[in-house]
Amino acid sequence: MTDPQPHLIEPSPRVGILSRLRNYFLTGLVVAAPITITVVLVTWFVDFVDAWFTPMIPDQYRPERYLDFTIPGLGLVIAVVLLTILGALTANLFGRTLVAYGERLVGRMPLVRNIYSALKQIFETVLSQSQQSFREVALIEYPRRGVYSIAFVTTAAKGEVQARADEEMVSVFLPTTPNPTSGFLLFVPRSDVITLEMSVEDAAKLVISAGLVAPEFDAEGTQLPSYHVRSTADEDAGRA
């Protein structure tokens, strides 16, 4: 016996031409924007360095004197060569003596010495191969308990900060979105830091994209530790 009222198949909603054009535009924007911004930033950096170091080349040795076009990046090559030579010269005893004498001279200038010492410490910390700076990504509870933020563990706390704390402290850098180069320096107990397996690059992408670009993670192949969430009753019991 046949069904007198056969089931009707509802047609799928058709996408309008304007919606398709909008989707195409957004797709093209996602593809073109990163490439364009990268090219603009690289071009700006190369032009900036060229403007500083290209005038050091005598006119008779400049390529544009013999060619009909300029060679971009020539100043960048000169900068790399000069910095390498400077590093080689300061590696010996004579160079270290000159650097020490210059630092003593700068140390006598009231305002300049503060700027120089701060910048030197930052560059030594970031560029030193022996330091594990910004090599560890972690979660910390910030700005309140129960809310977590991505942070970069820099080093163990030292000096008076650690001496006045009741437990082991670490210094972490909490980046801001969408500019991860700015942020806050926080001193957090090591026990409150949840270490993540993602790389610093993946964490930076996560921060810049406001959580939209999340790195891949295999939860099944990783043994995750169990973290005990402290409740108000636990804190009251601890105070008692």
Image (cartoon, grey):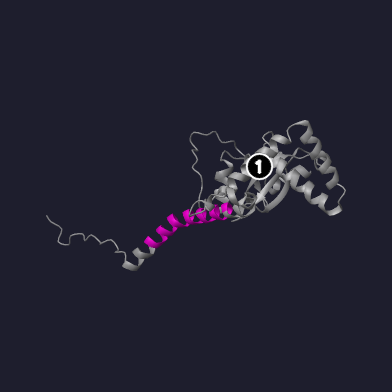
| Residue 237 located within the stretch drawn in magenta | no
Whether residue 209 is situated above or below residue 216 in the rendered picture: below
Front-most of residues 55 and 19: 55
152 on left or right of 8: right
85 on left or right of 205: right
| Residue 31 located within the stretch drawn in magenta | yes
Pointer 1: what residue? 82
**Residue 64 image point, x, y percent:** 53, 53
- Residue at the image point whose x is 50% and y is 54% from the top: 39
Q: Which quarter of the picture shows residue 98?
A: top right
- Residue at the image point whose x is 54% and y is 53% from the top: 65
**Residue 179 image point, x, y percent:** 61, 55
Whether residue 127 is situated above or below residue 13 in the rendered picture: above
- Residue at the image point whose x is 47% and y is 53% from the top: 35
**Residue 89 image point, x, y percent:** 72, 35
- Residue at the image point whose x is 56% and y is 56% from the top: 44
Q: Amino acid at mark 1?
A: Leu
| Stretch of the chain drawn in magenta | 23-46
Residue extending farthest to the left is 1
- Mark 1 is surrounded, within 10 Å at the Cα level, by few (under 14), some (14 to 19) or many (20 or more) other residues, namely few
Query: Quick check: can you spot residue 189?
Result: no
